[in-house]
């Protein structure tokens, strides 16, 4: 929401405006300068309204902004596959849900619910946020309610993450060097696989060595190889950053350099080296200020040749990496009853998967103070990202070993994928501020234009004759039945907005925002979207009745209401698209028409009047500070997402049996709270604070068209997903299990005749946790600061797909978790898991478990050297810190984590020296 | 009281730059704006409509050999096709057929309306002179024809129940379905066809003999026009529809249309067969099958599943009475099976492509003319048409100028049975005459009360 700035503060306003750019939203910080000063007191950790300071975030994670943000902002939930990708350096979340799912599963847009990310007023992609240097961050705000989001319009429909970077310090030249280095170690605590002795014993008991005692003995002799450790390493990574800044009231400058040359991951061969250079220049003269920021980032990344971590779970521990002659075999156990392709062999070849990205951004901002009350400002941002990915699979790979002789020339594969993004974004704003006695008014009028073009192409060549021919030029031909691909996509938006903020005596505040915009991503007959928000705030602590009250420092009551739009469909749901049917000409090979009469037809059905998703939101909240020690915030919100896109049956005479319509509703309602309590403060300078935050969200599918619901349920029954009005949209469904039949080892279901039937599927639980958030201690002692933060989640249900996959459907010929020994083996056995002949476990209540999670996300200690001591080392300031992150993780549902790339415990030493 | 400023709404600065927002992504499919910027896209889209029609769900199966033909009782069905021949509308097979036909036919109608919309919208695209007008008229005639095909199946005969409502008229891609009564709908269809015929006469290469072919634009030689809805085909369909109206005006119209086709002399009956067993020279309009798909259907029915002619065709006594009838070329020498007509060896004469699926034939024109004349009590005229027809077929008939109306009627019925073997037209003739019972494939007869109308699928 927009807050007022005192006229006295105008001097720093210009600078502030330059650096913070765009909207009044980002300008607002506190409601008094007093608080600003207080919060800068060393060690005191405040949440300033909704914004989190960079200082705080760095204490929760020294390098990863998204991880640090998740500690303080429990409403941020990364996409489901984040659990699979663990500590993969090259992973970028495909979607981030803020407060809960807002789309009906099964439609394309579900996969890409991404909030708007704004850095210093211009939009950046999630890739840039994932690589964002946390040291540059001054503050981050996550905007979740309509009153705050409305000004960002439809692009901010899924929430807005507003990042503000550090101001430039004026003065003589100042050099700051920052170092973050450390070691990572894999966290395999969720894995409990059988070792060689156990696996062999199991195989022997199951009779696999009948008449083959020799094989058993030779395998016994191989000892034990822990295949999970094979792809792992303990990398030492280091990151260096230098900032040179200085200047005076007319000119400020900053040069920024970043290098992370050794950024390796815990899987051997994976890395992400990031280099960046940036400059920023501010020029102020009388009423005019201009600033320009230019940054170039280059990222070289490689994926581990060891492949997917999960593959190592399956390798039998009695196989060794190398054969007796010291050469890595391509097939382990060749000639026996259970040969397995060796993932280790693949790493001895020269296959690779690498990526090179170059990102350029230039942002020019200007502000002109026309009169004392009126200011005109604007910015123009130009972004260009270029990405090239090369993947080479060696011809000696196991993958090509099955090719017949005549296709041997098709071995080896080289694929190239290129991606190019160009964005132009402009904003122009007119701001009016004035005060009349006790009334303060701030009004803003602005226009915003955004235009982006994304284009990509890809192609794959095959036929690279040798392991050394590792470039596309060596390919003989294009891969069979894999045609070149590509995509060109443009996204354009133009909008205007008006905002006003009124404050009476610092006690009562109200603001309102209205935004209207036209976007190329909307349907042709409904291309103009509107957003609005109204907010009210009562600073109760300013009231006469409470101003004398010593105990209550701050009491603020606020409420807001608004409607924001969100994108929810693709181009081909609202426009007709066509395709040629080359294989189906109308008349082919005829004498007069040797080319045949080519067929072209429309390939989709569309609704040009499809509307965007409309979120109606209201919230009420309170902030209370008492005794200068306790700060509590609580907020209740209720968001109803309407006009969700679903399918509806249609009169066939129109040409199509179904039609896209706006007929779904989802509600997300809940409570968010945070508490910061000073629990200890003594004369020696030790102070301890307890931090607790959490969110309790309830998601409900309010309405969905019967046609779509039935169609969806029929299609997704066997994956355990269904739609039921009144339940969470991503709830878990399965058939109730009646246990495992001791006679056959097969599962019996509670339905009709004991068999699995889609008609017996019932609701099993809601994956949204009842309460989730963080808690921990932060404290300072003299020059020391420390914190210990846990993250918790309790009450959500989960379908333990890992247990179903790795134990219930386990393959006796491969390795797996120790639970495999408890599978059903013979009649009369009361087993917990089905027999070895089970190949498919359909959704059953047996695997629905409650997931309560507790993890130690950060353990941090920092020390700031006294100025005097620092000067002795020729520095003006020196800070050192040690952080341990993701040290332990415990979950009530035993599930393997990091199946594609394992999680890591990281230990980082950080240094900040200012010269 | 302090003055408060009211914040004005931001004005939308959207000017004529609304094109700036019209951006289509480039992926595997193509957007309309980019695609329909040259004539070839329109021609290809037109081909797309005919490709829809020749699929197994419509004329490549359900509406011909694989379905409606068995309703005419001319073949003995095997177990799989028995429900069709027995008019078992509740069976899964026939219900499935009805659903497919209803859905696919309306999709084809949608495609016609869509292409019409595009032709009308994209006025800036350069067409070969006359080509656009021809396409618009062709689409108009085609749309009316497709609606009439639905009427022929899902409505009772107009004279039996003039007020029946079922088939809806789709005027455009965005229009609401219009529900008209049986007679009103058929009248409307005839009117649409009349309008289309007027335009086609001026622009169709089959009459003007001026082709619209150009570099990379094919298919509009006058000889190629028979693959698509053309002037003569429209006349033929109009004749069919007018005949079914059962009014004096209808008969006049029907006869006039038939005469127009016959007198122009563009088509002639086949004199020898050679490899062209479909007698493609007689087709006013035929659909190109999907490569050998129709031959495969024919082989599957007549060779693999051994479907034979039933007693209705009465091939033996037919052969005895008219041994030289050219139509025997369609049958095997033992007169039991129709496998030669659509076999893979039966090829269209000029193009050497697999046999066409006939939509409107010269034979039908003659028979329509004969029937119209008969209804007008012009027995001489009826005799004229019938005798010419029979002669051209190298067949024989017992008719003379003095035969009675009943005898003429019987002869017309016999010729319908023989002329349209495998083409699915006999059932419609029975329906038009509203016969209370028809000869059955079993040798007896089947009572046709309530059996003529296909059941419209509920959504």
Image (cartoon, helix red, strand yellow):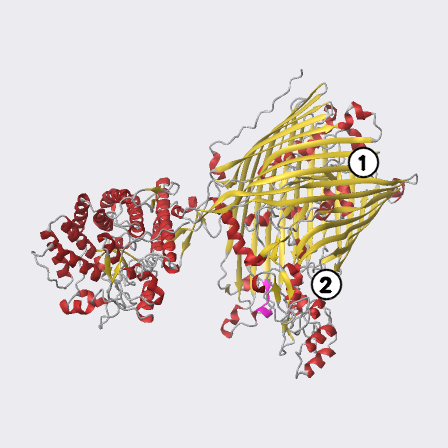
> Residue B274: x percent and y percent?
21, 67
- The residue nearer to you, when weighing A337 against B11, is A337
Residue A397 is inside the magenta segment: yes
Chain containing the residue with disc 1:
A
Return the disc, 1 or 2, that comes first in the chain's sequence: 1
Q: Residues within 10 Å of mark 2 (few under 14, many from 20)?
A: some
**Does B19 sit left or right of A560 as displayed?**
left
Visible residue check, residue A304: no
Visible residue check, residue B207: yes
Please give the range of residues in magenta.
A392-399
> Residue A270: x percent and y percent?
68, 59
- The residue nearer to you, when weighing B448 against A836, is B448
Indicate whether B2 appears above or below A320: above
The image quadrant of residue B253 is top left
> Which of label 1 and label 2 is nearer to you?
2
- The residue nearer to you, when weighing A688 against A34, is A688
Counting labels gives: 2
- Residue at image mark 1: A40
The image quadrant of residue A171 is top right
Indicate whether B282 appears above or below A464: above
Residue B386 is inside the magenta segment: no
- Residue at image mark 2: A191
Farthest-out residue, top: B1
């Amino acid at each position: 929401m927009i807050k007022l700035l005192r006229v006295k503060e105008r001097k720093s306003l210009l600078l502030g405006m330059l650096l913070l750019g765009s909207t009044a939203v980002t300008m607002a910080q506190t409601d008094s300068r007093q608080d600003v000063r207080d919060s800068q007191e060393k060690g005191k950790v405040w949440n300033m309204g909704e914004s989190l300071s960079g200082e705080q975030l760095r204490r929760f994670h020294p390098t990863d902004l998204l991880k640090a943000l998740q500690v303080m902002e429990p409403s941020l939930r990364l996409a489901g596959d984040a659990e699979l990708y663990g500590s993969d350096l090259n992973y970028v979340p495909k979607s981030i849900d803020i407060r809960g799912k807002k789309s009906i599963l099964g439609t394309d847009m579900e996969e890409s619910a991404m909030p708007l990310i704004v850095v210093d007023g211009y939009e950046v992609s999630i890739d840039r946020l994932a690589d964002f240097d946390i040291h540059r961050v001054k503050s981050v705000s996550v905007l979740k309610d309509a009153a705050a989001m409305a000004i960002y319009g439809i692009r901010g429909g899924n929430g807005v993450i507003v990042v503000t970077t550090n101001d430039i310090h004026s003065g003589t030249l100042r050099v700051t060097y920052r170092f973050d280095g450390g070691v990572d170690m894999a966290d395999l605590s969720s894995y409990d696989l059988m070792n060689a002795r156990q696996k062999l014993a199991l195989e022997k008991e199951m009779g696999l060595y009948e008449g083959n005692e020799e094989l058993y003995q030779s395998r016994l002799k191989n000892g034990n190889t822990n295949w999970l450790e094979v792809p792992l390493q303990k990398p030492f990574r280091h990151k260096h950053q230098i900032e040179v800044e200085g200047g005076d009231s007319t000119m400020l400058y900053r040069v920024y350099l970043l290098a992370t040359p050794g950024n390796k991951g815990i899987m051997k061969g994976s890395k992400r080296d990031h280099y960046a250079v940036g400059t920023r220049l501010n020029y102020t003269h009388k009423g005019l200020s201009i600033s320009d920021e230019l940054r170039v980032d280059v990222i070289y990344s490689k994926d581990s040749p060891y492949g997917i971590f999960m593959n190592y779970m399956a390798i039998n521990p009695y196989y060794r990496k190398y054969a007796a002659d010291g050469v890595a075999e391509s097939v382990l156990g060749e000639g026996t009853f259970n040969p397995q392709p060796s993932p280790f062999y693949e790493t001895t070849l020269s296959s690779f998967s690498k990526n090179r990205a170059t990102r350029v951004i230039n942002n020019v901002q200007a502000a002109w103070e026309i009169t004392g009350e009126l200011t005109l400002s604007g910015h123009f941002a130009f972004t260009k990202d270029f990405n090239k990915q090369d993947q080479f699979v060696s011809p000696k790979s196991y993958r090509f070993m099955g090719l017949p002789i005549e296709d041997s020339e098709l071995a080896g594969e080289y694929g190239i994928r290129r991606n190019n993004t160009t964005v132009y974004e402009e904003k122009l704003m007119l701001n009016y501020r004035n005060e009349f006695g006790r009334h303060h008014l701030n009004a803003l009028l602005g226009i915003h234009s955004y235009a982006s073009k994304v284009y990509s192409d890809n192609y794959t060549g095959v036929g690279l004759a040798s392991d050394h021919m590792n470039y596309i030029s060596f390919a003989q031909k294009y891969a069979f039945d894999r045609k070149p691909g590509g995509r060109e996509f443009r996204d354009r938006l133009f909008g205007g907005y008006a905002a006003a903020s009124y404050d009476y005596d610092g006690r009562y505040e109200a603001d309102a925002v209205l935004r209207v915009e036209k976007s190329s991503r909307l349907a042709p007959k409904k291309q103009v979207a509107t957003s609005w928000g109204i907010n009210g705030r009562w600073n109760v602590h300013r009231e006469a009745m409470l101003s004398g009250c010593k105990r209550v420092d701050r009491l603020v009551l606020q409420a807001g209401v608004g409607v924001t739009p969100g994108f929810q469909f693709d181009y081909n749901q609202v426009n007709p698209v066509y395709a040629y049917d080359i294989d189906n000409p109308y008349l082919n090979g005829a004498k007069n028409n040797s080319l045949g009469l080519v067929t072209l037809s429309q390939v989709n059905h569309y609704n040009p009047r499809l509307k965007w998703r409309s979120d109606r939101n209201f919230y009420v909240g309170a902030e209370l500070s008492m005794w200068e020690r306790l700060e509590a915030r609580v907020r209740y919100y209720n968001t109803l997402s309407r006009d969700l896109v679903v399918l509806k049956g249609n009169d066939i005479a129109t040409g199509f049996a179904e039609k896209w319509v706006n007929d779904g509703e989802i509600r997300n309602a809940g409570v968010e709270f945070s508490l910061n309590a000073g629990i200890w403060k003594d004369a020696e300078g030790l102070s301890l604070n307890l931090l607790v935050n959490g969110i309790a969200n309830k998601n409900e599918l309010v309405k969905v068209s019967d046609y779509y619901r039935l169609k969806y349920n029929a299609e997704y029954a066997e994956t355990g997903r269904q739609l039921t009005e009144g339940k969470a949209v991503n709830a878990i469904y399965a058939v109730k299990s009646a246990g495992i039949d001791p006679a056959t080892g097969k599962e019996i279901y509670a339905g009709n005749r004991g068999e699995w039937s889609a008609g017996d599927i019932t609701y099993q639980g809601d994956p949204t946790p009842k309460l989730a958030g963080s808690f921990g201690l932060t404290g300072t002692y003299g020059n020391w600061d420390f914190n210990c933060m846990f993250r918790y989640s309790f009450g959500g249900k989960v379908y333990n797909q890992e247990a179903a996959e790795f134990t219930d459907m386990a393959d006796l010929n491969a390795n797996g978790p120790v639970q495999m020994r408890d599978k059903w083996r013979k009649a009369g056995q009361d087993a917990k898991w089905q027999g070895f002949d089970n190949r498919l476990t359909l959704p059953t209540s047996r695997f629905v478990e409650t997931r309560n999670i507790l993890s130690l996300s950060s353990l941090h200690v920092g020390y700031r050297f006294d100025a005097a001591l620092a000067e002795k080392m020729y520095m003006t300031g020196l800070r050192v810190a040690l952080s341990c992150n993701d040290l332990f993780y415990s979950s009530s549902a035993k599930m393997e984590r990091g199946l594609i790339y394992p999680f890591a415990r990281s230990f980082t030493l950080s240094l900040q020296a200012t010269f | 009281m302090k003055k408060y400023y009211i914040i004005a709404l931001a004005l939308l600065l959207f000017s004529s730059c609304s094109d700036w927002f019209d951006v289509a992504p480039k992926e595997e499919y193509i957007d309309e704006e980019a695609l329909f910027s040259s004539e070839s896209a329109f021609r290809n889209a037109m081909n797309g409509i005919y490709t829809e029609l020749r699929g197994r769900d419509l004329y490549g199966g359900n509406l011909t050999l694989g379905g409606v033909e068995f309703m005419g009782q001319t073949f003995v069905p095997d177990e799989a096709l028995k429900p069709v021949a027995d008019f078992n509308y509740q069976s899964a097979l026939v219900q499935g057929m009805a659903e497919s036909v209803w859905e696919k036919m309306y999709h084809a109608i949608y495609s016609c309306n869509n292409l019409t919309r595009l032709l009308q919208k994209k006025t800036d695209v350069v067409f070969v002179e006359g080509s656009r007008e021809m396409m618009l008229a062709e689409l108009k005639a085609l749309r009316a024809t497709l609606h009439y095909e639905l009427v022929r199946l899902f409505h009772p005969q107009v004279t039996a129940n003039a007020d029946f409502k079922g088939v809806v008229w789709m005027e455009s891609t965005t229009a609401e379905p219009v529900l008209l009564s049986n007679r009103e709908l058929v009248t409307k269809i005839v009117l649409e066809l009349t309008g289309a015929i007027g335009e086609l006469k001026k622009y169709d290469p089959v009459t003007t003999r001026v082709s619209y072919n150009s570099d990379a634009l094919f298919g509009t030689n006058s000889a190629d026009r028979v693959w698509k809805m053309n002037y003569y085909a429209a006349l033929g369909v109009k004749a069919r529809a007018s005949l079914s109206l059962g009014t004096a005006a209808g008969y006049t119209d029907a006869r006039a249309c038939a005469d127009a086709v016959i007198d122009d002399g563009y088509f002639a009956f086949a004199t020898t067969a050679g490899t062209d067993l479909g007698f493609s020279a007689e087709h006013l309009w035929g659909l190109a099958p999907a490569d050998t798909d129709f031959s495969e259907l024919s082989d599957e029915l007549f060779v693999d599943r051994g479907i034979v002619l039933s007693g209705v065709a009465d091939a033996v006594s037919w052969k005895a009475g008219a041994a030289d009838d050219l139509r025997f070329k369609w049958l095997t020498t033992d007169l039991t099976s129709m496998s030669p007509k659509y076999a893979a060896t039966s090829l269209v004469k000029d193009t050497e492509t697999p046999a066409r699926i006939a939509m409107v034939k010269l034979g039908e024109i003659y028979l329509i003319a004969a029937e119209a004349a008969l209804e007008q009590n012009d027995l001489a005229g009826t005799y004229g048409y019938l005798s010419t027809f029979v002669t051209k077929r190298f067949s024989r008939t017992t008719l003379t100028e003095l035969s009675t109306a009943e005898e003429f009627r019987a002869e017309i019925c016999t010729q319908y049975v023989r002329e349209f073997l495998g083409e699915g037209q006999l059932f419609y003739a029975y329906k038009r005459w509203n016969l209370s019972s028809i000869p059955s494939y079993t040798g007896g007869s089947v009572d046709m009360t309530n059996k003529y109308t296909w059941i419209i699928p509920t959504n």
